[in-house]
Amino acid sequence: MLAGEVIIDHNFYDAAGNQEMREITDNECLPFVQITSFQPEKVMPAQNLTKDNLYDYLIQYIALKNIFLAVKICRWFEKLIIRRPFAQTKPYPSVVQVFEQQIVETITNIKSSLIGFWTPQSSRELSVAGCHLHFIDFTHKTSVYFIVI
């Protein structure tokens, strides 16, 4: 099951593609979660980043081969193409089926955060290999599960 959880500022938000974003209560269960406190060891300028060049940008500063890395990008974005899967119910569809039916939209001129994790290829069974990012605007009203920038 895929869900659209985003952890930011010590709050948990559910952002299923076909529903309003809502704060998750303390008694709810999550199918999977990655958490960090975002205490940066390095802070770098984030300019001209795209999904295609993010890896090359990060390896200039950090050896990514066999580590997990939390990433947070805060800035004004001219354009984000975002995608959100719908909430699923049993029997759960395959990942391919989920992404065939997801919401895809373009957001322009927005101040927001991209948060996520770099997962090494060797750990692809645990999480999405490569950089897996979430988006949340600063009003906490819009969020997505995956992002394409």
Image (cartoon, rainbow, N blue to C red):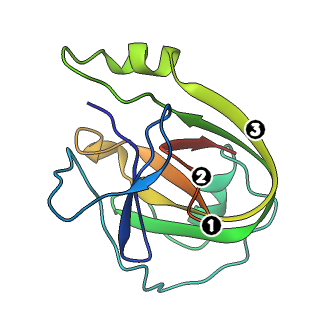
Placement of 142 over or under 71, stated as above or below: above
| Mark linked to residue 142 | 2
Tell me residue 90's x, y (percent). Answer: 19, 18
Residue where numbered disc 1 is placed: 139
The kind of residue on which mark 2 rests is Thr
Q: Residues within 10 Å of mark 3 (few under 14, many from 20)?
A: few
Q: Residue at x 66, y 61 (%)?
A: 57
SS label for mark 1: loop
Q: Position of residue 100 (x, y in %)?
A: 51, 14
Which residue: 56% across, 63% down? 140
Image coordinates for residue 66, horizontal then vertical, percent:
33, 58
Nearer mark to the viewer, of 2 and 3? 2
Measured as percent of width and height from the top left, residue 104 is found at 64, 29
Q: Which mark is residue 24?
A: none
Q: Element at badge 2?
A: loop
Q: Kindly identify which numbered label has been placed on residue 106.
A: 3
Tell which of 120 and 90 is nearer to you.
90
